[in-house]
Image: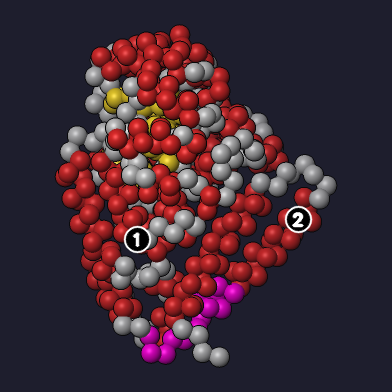
Amino acid sequence: MKVSFDQILRRISTIDRDIQELNRFKNRIPGNRVYYSNLNATFDGKLKELKHEKDSLLELTIKNPPNWILGVINSFAIESRSENKSYTPKGLGNLPKLEKTMNSSRNVKQFLRDIPKTEIHLHLEACLSKSSLLELLNKNEIKISEEEFNQKFIFNDLNGFIQLFFFIQSSVKHESDFSILIDSVGQYMKRDNIIYSEVYLAPTKFLQIGLDFNKMMEVVIRGIRKIKSEDEREIKLLVDVSRTFGSDNAMNNLKRVLKLEYPEVIGIGLGGAELLGPAKDYEEVFALAKQSGLRVVAHAGEDDGPWSIWDAIKYLKAERIGHGTSAIQDPELMKYLKDNKIPLEVCITSNLFTGKYVKLAENHPVKQFYENGIIITINTDDPEIFDVRLSDEFLILHENLKFNIDEIMDIIKSGVYATFHPEKDELWSKIKSEIDKFRIIYDL
C-alpha cells in the first residue's frame, strides 16, 4: 500500500497531539486511589505504542518527495552553516530520520511555534516549571511528598486552580527567589518565540510573609532587563490587585506601585476569585490608577456572568478584559465590546480546565467572538500549570475551531495592537516580516 508524504505528516502530527493529551489526562489521575497503578499502566502502554508508531514512521524512506521539502533542506543547511555547525545532507532517502525536517513545512504546529508572537495574559508564578518549583521547595526546605506534590496539580475548578497558585507562591521565602521566577518567564518565552509579554505579578501573598515590596520588585526588574539585554525579549508588568484580599489591600498595593519608578511596571489588573468581589468595590482604586497614568485591565467573565464584564467596563474603565468567556451570553455586550474596541484576553486551555462555561475546545466561543468583530488575543494564562504553550493555543484555533492560517495571522496582529507597547506599528512590522519568511519556508 502506498502512503503519501502528506498522510505521514498528518499521522505524526496526530500522534504528537494524542501523546500530549494522554500525558495531560495521566497527570490528572488522583494518586491516592487504589486503581491508580492499573490506570497508570494502561496510559503507559498506550503512550509506548504511539511512540513506537511514530519512530517507525520516521524511519520510512521517501521516494519522489514533494518539491517544497527541498526549500526546507536548504533553509536548515543555511541555518547550520550560519551557526558554524557541521551539516552534511544524507540524501532524501534518510530525510525522514530528521525529526526537525518532518515537523517543518505544512506542519502548522511547528510554524506556529517558530513565528514571533506576543502574549498579554500571563501570570508570573504560573510560568514556574515543576522542576524549578521543586528546586525552590528544596532551597527553602519545604518538605512535601511526591504524591502530595502531584496532587496539587489536580483540580476541577477555578478555586482549585487558585489554591495551587497560592501553593506556588508559598514556595517563595526570600526576595532573591524572584530571580528564579522571572528567569522561568524568559525561558518560557524563548521556547515558543514570544518576543513581548505583559505579565501579572501578584504581591499580596509575598507581603503577608514579610517580604519587602521594593526589594522584590528590584530583583524582578533586574531579571527583566537581563532577559532583554541577552535575548532581546521584552517583559512589562501588571501588578495584580486581587479580589481575594479585598479593596483596602488593593489600594495599598496600588500605592506601592505608584512609588515605583520602573518603566517596566505599566499598570494594574484585577484578578483573584471573581465571585468574591464585584468590580464596583474597586472603582476608587482603578480611578486613582488611571489618573496616575497607569494602564488598567481586569479578569471578568471567567467564573461569573456577563454582568461581571459590564461592571469591569463601567466601574473600572478596564481597557482589556481577561477571559470574557461569558460575554457570549449577552449579544448587547458583544456589540459593545466590538464598537468600543475592547480586546478580550482569551485563554482557551485555561477555560477548559476550569470548565465553568466551556468543556470542549470546539465549543469555545472564541470563534463567535471573532466572527462578530470583537478584538481577540490568544494567551496561555498559566502555561506551566496547564502544561500548554502559546503555539498550542493557536493550534487549537486551527484544528478544533477551524480557523485558517490567514485568520490566525489576523489574531496575532490583533494581539500586537492590543498590547500596551508604545511602538505597536514598529513591533508588528518586525513580527510580520518574520512571519512572511516562515510562510514561504512552510508553504503556508
* 64 is within the stretch colored magenta: yes
Image height check: is 93 above or below 15? below
Looking at the image, which is closer to me, 361 or 179?
A: 361
Tell me the kind of residue under disc 1: Ile
The colour style of the image is secondary structure
Q: Is residue 146 left or right of residue 352?
A: right
Report x, y in % for residue 297.
Answer: 36, 27
Q: Tell me which residue sits at (62%, 35%) in the image.
A: 157
Q: Which residues are magenta?
A: 53-65
Q: Tell me which residue sits at (36%, 36%) in the image.
A: 335
Q: Which mark is residue 179?
A: none
Image height check: is 1 above or below 373? below
Looking at the image, which is closer to me, 310 or 138?
A: 310
Give the residue at mark 2: 39
Report x, y in % for residue 367.
Answer: 43, 50
Q: Which mark is residue 405?
A: 1
Screen quadrant of the N terminus: bottom right
Name the image quarter holding residue 313.
top left
Report x, y in % for residue 44.
Answer: 69, 61
| Residue 191 in view | no
| Residue 160 in view | yes
Q: Tell me which residue sits at (41%, 53%) in the image.
A: 394
Cα–Cα span, label 1 and label 2: 38 Å
